[in-house]
């Protein structure tokens, strides 16, 4: 009874104007929030077990009695993976009638994951996002321009829903070349700009040359960002740049920064976050369960991102807890200025090119304010790096128009490095194909996924 009353209060608060929502939602006592999360988790389990073909069969296979489960950790080694979505198909996860769908912008497989939602879920996430954006200082008098890619991506849609509750002027420009955006946006004098971090870097470089206008803030989503790059952008515009973390599977933002930029504030009302296995520093793979989804809930979904859950309260005073900035991925997909890339991308780029061995490696670096893809190949028949680069660029334009578009917009640079045969493998049995060599924290730390984490993936 108490839980239902709390849920009614929360939903009522979210339907208030953002300024009132912020004030009231921060008054929710921790015990009330915990009770509500547990009730929502149990409801989600029942919904999935009764209506989802995948979860019904998977629970039976794992001998899971969902009536006895009170906490995600009680599910043991049961997880949902991206591979489950691809192999079984999204329809096997449905528990209700969908109104819309989005797709992953890139994965370790060329097969996209399709995620379905209802219009109610879209509106609810928009209201929740509006609360977070209001806390960052967005007000009705602001003028928002968005350069998010609108092709099957959820972020621009959620932003549009949030903006209507903030009552702001909003233009969805789409992911056009930064130079074109600059010229077309300048007459409107937008004071808030949304976009992918690598795109915002390029726009800022253009603005530094041609002139800036007053900005209140920028907001980046879709990929990680080096702190040195953030500082560069902020210095050019003399305005803060805030970052968010999310996935298409989560319906956009899972967490976002506050004005302190000290970790991402988690959406604990809509998701249950876990890091089941952690290293000595507390970092582990982020696993989350959706708590308010009626169409396609996900239970203990493996994000493949390594982060740390921060339980200490943030000095900003907001009640929701935080997660640290993502430091690495458990798979070899890297999110960068090129896009979301995995080994299969580079295999296709090198396919059909003679004069190189089967060993190669793609290193993602950050140089001169932008991402650099350094593709390392072993030359066998006198072919030079320039020859390989010309062929790779031709394959890029023929097979990956989005990645070629990002290269044209200078969101990243491409370099081919030629090596002697055997140089990459050495004495190792395996080569890590895609390596993120950027440093996203003040300390030069690159984490690899624990072997035990990688071995617990649920294939069924």
Image (spheres, rainbow, N blue to C red):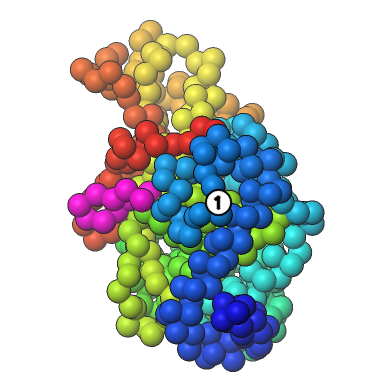
Q: Position of residue 65 (x, y in %)?
A: 54, 47
Q: Position of residue 233 (x, y in %)?
A: 42, 67
Looking at the image, which is closer to me, 82 or 2?
A: 2
Left or right for 422, reference 191: left
115 shown above or below 137: above
Left or right for 234, reference 295: left
* Residue 267 in view (yes/no): no
Q: Which residue is drawn at the image coordinates 65% and 34% (left, top)?
A: 88
Left or right for 416, reference 98: left
**Quadrant in which the C terminus appears:** top right
Magenta highlight: main SS? loop
Q: Which residue is drawn at the image coordinates 24% and 49% (left, top)?
A: 279
334 shown above or below 353: below
Span of residues in magenta: 276-285
**Residue wearing tag 1:** 66
457 shown above or below 231: above
Crowd class of label 1 (few under 14; some 14 to 19; many from 20; radius 10 Å): some
């Amino acid at each position: 009874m108490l839980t239902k009353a709390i849920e009614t209060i929360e939903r009522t608060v979210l339907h208030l104007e953002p300024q009132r929502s912020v004030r009231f939602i921060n008054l929710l006592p921790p015990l009330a929030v915990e009770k509500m999360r547990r009730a929502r988790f149990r409801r989600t389990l029942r919904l999935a077990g009764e209506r989802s073909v995948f979860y019904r069969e998977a629970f039976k296979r794992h001998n899971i009695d969902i009536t006895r489960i009170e906490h995600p950790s009680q599910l043991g080694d049961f997880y949902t993976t991206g591979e489950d979505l691809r192999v079984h198909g999204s329809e096997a996860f449905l528990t209700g009638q969908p109104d819309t769908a989005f797709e992953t912008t890139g994965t370790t497989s060329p097969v996209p994951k399709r995620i379905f939602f209802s219009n109610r879920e879209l509106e609810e996430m928009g209201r929740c996002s509006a609360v977070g954006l209001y806390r960052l200082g967005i007000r009705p008098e602001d003028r928002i321009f968005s350069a998010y890619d609108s092709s099957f991506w959820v972020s621009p849609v959620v932003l549009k829903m949030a903006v209507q509750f903030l009552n702001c002027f909003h233009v969805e420009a789409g992911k056009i070349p930064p130079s074109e955006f600059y010229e077309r946006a300048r007459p409107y004098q937008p004071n808030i700009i949304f976009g992918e971090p690598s795109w915002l870097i390029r726009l800022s470089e253009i603005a530094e040359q041609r002139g800036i206008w007053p900005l209140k803030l920028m907001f980046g989503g879709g990929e990680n960002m080096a702190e040195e790059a953030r500082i560069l952008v902020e210095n050019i515009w003399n305005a803060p740049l805030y970052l968010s973390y999310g996935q298409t599977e989560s319906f956009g933002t899972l967490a976002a920064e506050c004005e302190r930029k000290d970790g991402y504030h988690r959406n604990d009302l809509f998701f249950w976050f876990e890091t089941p296995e952690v290293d000595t520093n507390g970092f582990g793979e982020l696993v989350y369960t959706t708590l308010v989804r009626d169409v396609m809930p996900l239970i203990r979904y493996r994000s493949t991102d390594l982060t740390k859950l921060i339980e200490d309260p943030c000095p900003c005073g907001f009640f929701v807890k935080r997660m640290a900035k993502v430091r690495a991925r458990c798979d070899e997909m890297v999110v960068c200025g090129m896009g979301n890339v995995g080994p299969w991308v580079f295999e296709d780029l090198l396919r059909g090119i003679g004069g190189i061995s089967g060993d190669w490696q793609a290193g993602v670096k950050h140089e001169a304010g932008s991402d650099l893809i350094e593709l390392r190949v072993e030359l066998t028949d006198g072919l030079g790096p320039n020859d390989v680069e010309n062929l790779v660029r031709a394959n890029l334009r023929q097979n990956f128009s989005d990645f070629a578009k990002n290269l044209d917009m200078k969101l990243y640079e491409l370099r081919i490095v030629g090596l002697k045969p055997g140089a990459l493998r050495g004495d190792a049995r395996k080569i890590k194909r895609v390596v993120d060599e950027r440093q996203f924290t003040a300390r030069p730390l690159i984490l690899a996924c624990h072997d035990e984490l990688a071995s617990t993936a649920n294939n069924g």
